[in-house]
Amino acid sequence: MTEARHYDVVILGAGMAGLCLARQLILQSEKTVLMLDRRGEIPPKRQKVGESSVQVSGYYLGKVLDLEEYLVHEQLLKYNLRFHYKKADDANENFEDYSVSYIRTYSNIPTYQLDRNTLEAALMKMNLECERFRFVGPATELETRLATTDEDTHEVAFRNGEAAESVTARWVVDTTGRARFIARNSGLKRENAIDHGSSFLWVDGLVNIERLTEMAHRDRRLRRERQSIGSSPFWLATNHFVGEGFWFWVIPIRHKTSLGLVYDRSRVNENDVNTPEKLMKWICREFPLFERDLPKRKVLDWGYLRDYSHDCAQTISTKRWAMSGESGRFSDPLYSPGGDLIALYNTMIGDAILTDDPVQLRLKCRFYEGMMRAFYEAYVPSFSDGYDMLGDQECFVMKYTWELTVYFSFYVLPFINDMFTRLKFLSRFLPLFGRLGPVNKALQPFINDYHHWKKAHREPSAETTFFDFYEIPCLKMAETLFYRVGLSEAETAELLERQLAVVMEYSRFIVIHITAQVLDDESVYRNRAFAESIDFANLKFHPRQMRTRYADCAKDGDPMQWSVCPSVFQRFHTAARPETMLAAGD
């Protein structure tokens, strides 16, 4: 575009968040956009991490940004997520040695395994085809003077090669990623309770985990276990190999494989994994099946983050500045929420940019800041409290199916119906969503404490166990919401009210199940009075109190009916350790 002195929007940073926002504005408006980046080459030569998308980000990229054809032709379709667990007292040298939790069917909302570099190159090319978009890179000596009132414009100065430029803008959006330009310069950076690190690398070719075995090709193909686990290519999934306090990802992208370890820093010594050589050695020792493959691979690139998670005091303002992507808040890569937060934030930021009425803008910014914080804070307890139980298949299945039911219902359904920019809907949504927060904060440590109790009181599993997450009825029912498109505000809110009852029932079932296992008493499942007496505000994992509370309700004859079968987790149960069995009354 012709160089101008004033732009509707200046976007700082040309990563995925900024490039997606620019395309969104180009498709939805006539706004002029200036994008600045300190780098001259977009994308950079170094490989970019964060390849896996889930339903919100998949829908945003495919449908909202109209990239479906590009994604199907140039990227890889994703086959959900899979979690692999080692068996106790086993060499774990073959793929078939590992227990697995998974979703066997493909999602109605496509998700993708993304080569971030090629995706960002394609986005930049598409944006540059629009005459209302201008990119400057490298843009150095960047300075911003943000507006001090709701009516002022912003001033942005930078050096473009040898020339100094200064422009004004109605909106400034920070997508500088971990540089966090606005948060750093405005004193908005905040810490959070997540203390995790990550070490990652890319190798040439496809690491096909099904081939990490001594089993012959025909035997692999005809395994009886395929009746449970299916025959779709497992390598298209985001495969997680998990242990207490850490998980290791295997993600395919075209012509290469992304491999990465994410860990609680109190559980894994970062000095053991902070180079490609150390990481390879650590993984092959922890998950011996990889010894068959990884030492032979050429490492193409690698990276290391000592502490990646952070908070921010504010991410959108009535003074018409905002942050998206990692420049504002970032929680954790487990479940791949980074792309979702970009999709959600960009949706609300884009709507605010298109709002000219100052009264409406003030109202929207207030709602949107509350929504952005609510989405972020919903993730934090899952990650700050949940890493210990990653290696416990039963505990993780409970944790994940609860979280995924909430996600399908309260994130995906409203997003595919364009509800997160409708204030009338948000006024009904926020109170419903807010009721989940205290339950989640109580449930996460409760499951985690059960995990630690099991370590002391139950033998570790020596069996290979398969579990399809859709065996939990409330999750399978939530998946049907992917087809509910074109709903009104009232219809969406009414659906969520019904879903709230469903997820609340499941949260109570989890507490009841754990109590039944600790007390070794199947009658707990049938006791309505005990189920209805659960108080999440005061929920604590305390076996003696469980026994006392249940004794107070045990004579109640009114039976409890659950939508989930009480025996659904039976396959995970192992024998009690005789020397640590609880005496009656403990």
Image: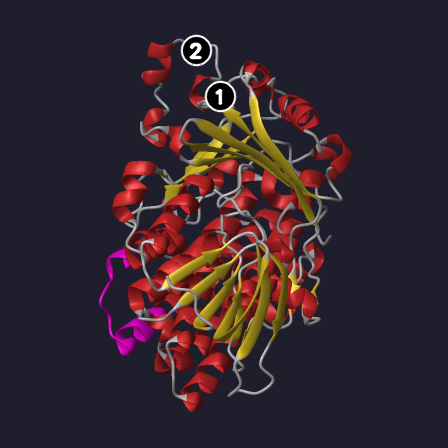
Q: Nearer the viewer, residue 35 or 408?
A: 35
460 left or right of 559 in image: right
Query: Magenta stretch: dominant SS?
Result: helix
Residue 234 percent location from the top left of the image: 39, 29
**Which residue is found at the position 33% from the left and 10% from the top?**
218
Say how the picture is coloured.
secondary structure
Residue 392 percent location from the top left of the image: 59, 39
Amino acid type assigned to the residue bearing label 1 in the image: Phe
What kind of element bears circle 1?
A: helix
Q: Nearer the viewer, residue 48 or 584?
A: 48
Q: Quadrant of the N terminus?
A: bottom left
Q: Is 129 contained in the magenta span? A: no
Amino acid type assigned to the residue bearing label 2 in the image: Met
Q: Nearer the viewer, residue 537 or 275?
A: 275
**Whether residue 443 can be seen here:** no
Residue 580 percent location from the top left of the image: 74, 39
Q: Which residues are magenta?
A: 481-497
**Residue 299 vertical position relative to residue 80 in the rendered view, above or below:** above
Say few, some or many: other residues with alpha carbon within 10 Å of mark 2 (under 14 / 14 to 19 / 20 or more): some
109 left or right of 455 in image: left
Q: Are marks 2 and 1 in contact (CB under 8 Å)?
A: yes
Name, please, the residue furthest toward the front: 162
**Whether residue 123 can be seen here:** yes
Which residue does the numbered mark 1 point to in the structure image? 95
Question: Could you say which quadrant of the image residue 77 lies in?
Answer: top left
Which residue does the numbered mark 2 point to in the structure image? 215
573 left or right of 484 in image: right
Q: Is 495 contained in the magenta span? A: yes
Give the mark, 2 or 1, whose residue is nearer the N terminus.
1
Say few, some or many: other residues with alpha carbon within 10 Å of mark 1 (under 14 / 14 to 19 / 20 or more): many
Label 2 to label 1: alpha-carbon separation: 9 Å
193 left or right of 558 in image: right
